[in-house]
Image (cartoon, helix red, strand yellow):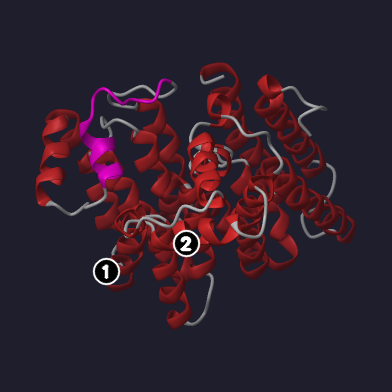
Amino acid sequence: MEALIPLEYYTTVYYYILLVVCLFMYLSSATVGLENDNNLKNKNILGVAMVIFTIVYIGLRPVSGAYFGDMRTYSDAFERYAAGDMVDVSAAAKDMYFEYFMKACSTVMSQEAFFFVCAAIYVIPLYFVCRKFFRQFWFYGFAMLIFSFSFWSYGTNGIRNGMATSLFLLAISRESRIWTYAIFGLTLMIHKSMLIPIGAFTVASYYTNTRNYLIAWAIAIPVSFALGSALENFFLTLGLFDDSRLQEYLGDEDSVEATFKTGFRWDFLLYSSVGIFCGWYFLVKKKLEDTFYRHLFHTYLIANTFWILVIRANFSNRFAYLSWFMLGLVVIYPFLKNRFFDNQHIIVGRIAFAYYAFTFFMAIYIYS
């Protein structure tokens, strides 16, 4: 893979391949019905190909810190474990499962194989989630997840977080709450920041007033804009986050990622509002009765509201990701579970195109 695609073009090639897939979806949506047998057969074949491609392309990427951020840190840790280092118990307490998982892998495989396994853990749960929720329409759900702005970054850079969020989605797709919370526990041991979406999911289990969640989200915007860093300091003083990484994200002004600005992120807020509008439109305006979608939307709202309150923080994108990983499902779920429009396939194609257009523009023209 490294010989075929120069490292400096590796990410760009990925986004252009997805652009081709997105354009195919858009064009086919105008020529054939969503439920057409040939359409579903072709999309199933394309979907399987995309699952395999995504795992292989992410999993076999060259090791690089310059192009894939924290990948170099993971590589160095893996090499230390492979050389015989034991897991630092005090450090492992933060993300216990992942550290022992890396140590175990270092005894039986190369670091290249390790990153491939991580990619598989990142992608395969999404396949099962979409199969569970959307059955024959699963390709559309999977496409929206990999079209998401943050998907590539959390498969190649924030690897632990990406694995944890994919398992979170797998957890909420389980019918048994025992399995759901068992997998939640696993995600916490992979990345402690999962406390935020897990907490949001739990709160949403007991409080179900959509309008009040929407009001709270809207109020959070001027509150965050007015109070700024005071809110970040407030969350730090609460001691809710005993993870040094989370405290660094909030408080260390000298460690800002070069590719992400700080300040009030209106572009990120606009992106987040896509999910807010979809949830409002279907649950409030269209009065959609779907218990799971309501729960998912409320979870997204709570997690996104927390991010808004710390929107000026360093690494704000990492807090945003704790809601964004759900965004593709929040947007596409109603269209694949209900029929609202006569030309629904055309609308799905346009939504997928617009959704990916933001990702493509940001990745190629803003952050490249």
Where residue 295 sits in the image (x, y, percent)? 40, 66
Disc on res. 100: 2
Where residue 82 sits in the image (x, y, percent)? 57, 51
Residue 319 vertical position relative to residue 238 in the rendered view, above or below: above
Looking at the picture, tell me which residue is in the foreground, 140 or 288: 140
The part of the chain drawn in magenta is 244-258
Asked if residue 213 can be seen in this view, the reply is yes
Q: Tell me which corner region of the image, top left, top right, bottom left or bottom right, holds residue 264.
A: top left
Q: Answer few, some or many: residues within 10 Å of disc 1's Cα (few below 14, many 20 plus, some between 14 and 19).
A: few
Identify the amino acid type marked 2: Tyr
Verify whether residue 246 appears in magenta: yes
Q: Answer few, some or many: residues within 10 Å of disc 2's Cα (few below 14, many 20 plus, some between 14 and 19).
A: some
Query: Closer to the camera: disc 1 or disc 2?
Result: 2
Verify whether residue 1 appears in magenta: no
Where residue 202 sits in the image (x, y, percent)? 32, 69
Mark 1 lies on a secondary structure that is loop
